[in-house]
Image (tube, helix red, strand yellow):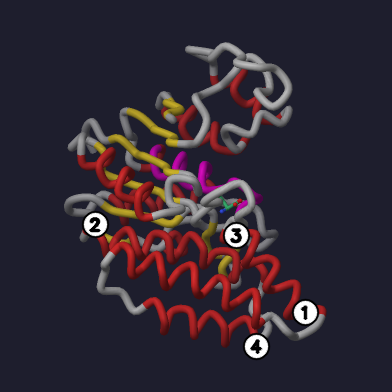
Amino acid sequence: MKDIKVCKFGGTSMATRESINRVIDIVSADDRRKFVIVSAPGKRNKSDIKVTDQLYKIVEEQKTTGNFKESFDALKERFVSLTKELGVDFDIISELDNLEKAIANGATASYAASRGEYLSAKLLSAKTGWTFIDAKDIVRFNDCGVFDPEYTNDTAKALLQNVKGRAVIPGFYGCGADGYVKTFSRGGSDVTGSIVAGAVKASLYENWTDVSGFLVADPRIIKDPEVIETITYRELRELAYMGASVLHEDAIFPVRKEGIPINIRN
Ligand code: ASP
């Protein structure tokens, strides 16, 4: 495929109607931005909770006390109002009812957590008309639960090359060898974006986040550290491995293999 950009948007970008509209503007501003990978809605303000954290909390409550109603209602309220604000024709209530039933029946934490990204992508697709492609049909883990890059790359290539127009894909999860949903570790939507970029041989992997690229120091400790303009894959991986939370450390391999540059955007 020729001159395609793959864009990944983090939780802050998917948190509110305003930020989602900004995502749509950014993507629409460049015809090459064809594949869009999204995280689950993140925090709307400092005291808010990320949808992913809320989902893990709900599963934990189900397991320990069996009572997750209050937390689930908060999640429901969040998605229902976001759907209303976006003004999309999407049956969020039945999606959430199914999720609630699944959790009551002992759904795995992986499955529950993955629904944050799933619903985020479904809403964006409903709002824009961009094709929804389920990550479960692309990303594959082997029977030891380890990410299977060959299998994934083959399926992703086959599936993505036929997409007409733009497509939106939920980040963070895929399919285990047992057919059940399995997630990457936290922050794994970066990995999904990189996999998609590698599979379609994108000209650029744009990672849109809430920080201004890689900094020379941790901004929580050092005031206004300088931005690193250019960095090698190796340096990037090392920094990610050492805890710079800009990009998931496993997001480097799929793009490095194809020599695709990563652009970290605020
Ligand atoms: N939503 C997941 C997390 O909070 C994955 C991601 O955002 O990349 O870890």
Residue beneath disc 1: 63
186 drawn magenta: yes
Residue beneath disc 4: 105
Q: CA distance from mark 4 to mark 2?
A: 33 Å
| In the foreground, 168 or 199 | 168
Tag 4 near tag 2, CB within 8 Å: no
Residue beneath disc 3: 52
| Residue kind at label 4, given as amino acid type | Asn
| Residue kind at label 1, given as amino acid type | Lys
Residue beneath disc 2: 130
Q: How many marks?
A: 4
Location of residue 259 by image quarter: top left
**Residue 200 location (% of width, % of height):** 33, 41
Q: CA distance from mark 1 to mark 2?
A: 37 Å
Q: CA distance from mark 4 to mark 3?
A: 19 Å
* Furthest residue toward right: 64
Residue for point 21% across, 60% down = 129
| In the foreground, 218 or 99 | 218
Tag 2 near tag 3, CB within 8 Å: no
